[in-house]
Amino acid sequence: MKEVPISYVKANQTGIVVFVLLAFAFQWTWLVALLWVIQVFGLVGGGKWNLFVAVSKRFLSRSGTETQAAELTMFNNALAVLFLSLSLASFAIGWSIAGYIFTGFLLLAAGAALLGYCIGCTIYYQYKQFILRRE
């Protein structure tokens, strides 16, 4: 099973939190769009093309660190892309409040993950349980 160092996962979560807080503080919706691009590149490249991970690799060591399953990391990244896509679509049609709400959901999820509770992991677990029960 392929694994991803937790330090890289935390770097991505920190990048999300910082970008969203800056977008909220300065009402820079373009920063939400940039975050979407970073997350899409990370999703498509399996994490290799994620800017936050690339920057963190210069400062963090891979050896001897705790890891997370790559499949779970990609699921969480897909959720981030979903929320950012919904946010950008809302901004595009003039629904700014909805755009900020979707971005806020992502902020809450990434912030909770940094504090130790992974909402995406819980959703993933429930999804896997649902699939197993259907079989």
Image: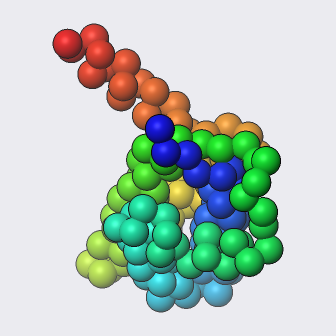
97 horizontally vs 131: left or right = right
Way the structure is coloured? rainbow
**Which quadrant does the C terminus fall into?**
top left
**Taking 89 as reference, is 112 above or below it?**
above
Residue lying furthest front: 63
Residue 34 visible, this angle:
yes
Residue 19: percent from left, percent from top? 62, 76
* 105, 122: nearer the viewer: 122
Would you identify the image quadrant in which residue 45 lies? bottom left
**Taking 38 as reference, is 11 above or below it?**
above
In the image, what residue occupies the spot 53% across and 57% down?
A: 106
Residue 17 visible, this angle:
no
* 125, 61: nearer the viewer: 61
In the image, what residue occupies the spot 68% across and 64% down?
A: 11
**Taking 70 as reference, is 43 above or below it?**
below
In the image, what residue occupies the spot 65% across and 60% down?
A: 8
In the image, what residue occupies the spot 49% across and 64% down?
A: 47
Residue 107: percent from left, percent from top? 60, 59
Q: How many badges with numbers are in the image?
A: 0
Residue lying furthest left: 135
Residue 131: percent from left, percent from top? 27, 22
* 77, 96: nearer the viewer: 77
